[in-house]
Image (cartoon, rainbow, N blue to C red):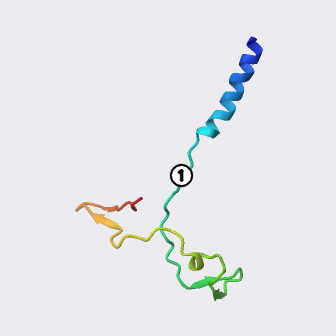
């Protein structure tokens, strides 16, 4: 293999390998808490069903009952479970 071909091969390897090795993960965001009131672009209350708003989808992880832990000198947030 010539030196030029080897350089091209190594360059292509470095260009294609990182995206192939990248791992996609999921982030577990908490629910927004929006329930039934949704708003249109003008700020008027509309029905949430089939709007795609948070009140319609209800996506996310449930919040813990106790969201902060009292350590005596400071309140520390409790991390949501995976």
Q: Quadrant of the N terminus?
A: top right
Q: Which residue is mark 1?
A: 25
Q: Quadrant of the C terminus?
A: bottom left
Q: Is residue 23 above or below residue 64?
A: above
Q: Is residue 4 left or right of residue 26?
A: right
Q: Position of residue 14 (x, y in %)?
A: 66, 29
Give the residue displayed 53% in from the left and 82% down from the top.
35
Q: Is residue 26 above or below residue 12?
A: below
Locate residue 9: give its quadrant. top right
Give the residue furthest to the left.
72
Give the residue displayed 65% in from the left and 87% down from the top.
46
Q: Is residue 24 above or below residue 33?
A: above
Q: Is residue 16 above or below residue 81?
A: above
Q: Is residue 81 left or right of residue 52?
A: left
Give the residue furthest to the top.
2
Label 1 SS? loop
Q: Is residue 36 left or right of residue 82?
A: right
Q: Nearest the camera: 8 or 46?
A: 8
Q: Position of residue 64 (x, y in %)?
A: 37, 70
Q: Position of residue 61 (x, y in %)?
A: 46, 68
Give the residue displayed 72% in from the left and 18% down from the top.
7
């Amino acid at each position: 293999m010539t030196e030029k071909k080897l350089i091209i091969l190594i360059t292509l390897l470095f260009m294609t390998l990182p995206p192939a090795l990248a791992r996609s993960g999921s982030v577990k965001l908490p629910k927004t808490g929006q329930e039934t009131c949704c708003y249109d672009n003008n700020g008027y209350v509309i029905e949430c069903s089939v709007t795609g708003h948070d009140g319609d989808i209800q996506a996310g992880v449930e919040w813990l009952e106790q969201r902060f832990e009292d350590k005596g000198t400071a309140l520390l947030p409790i991390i949501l479970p995976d």
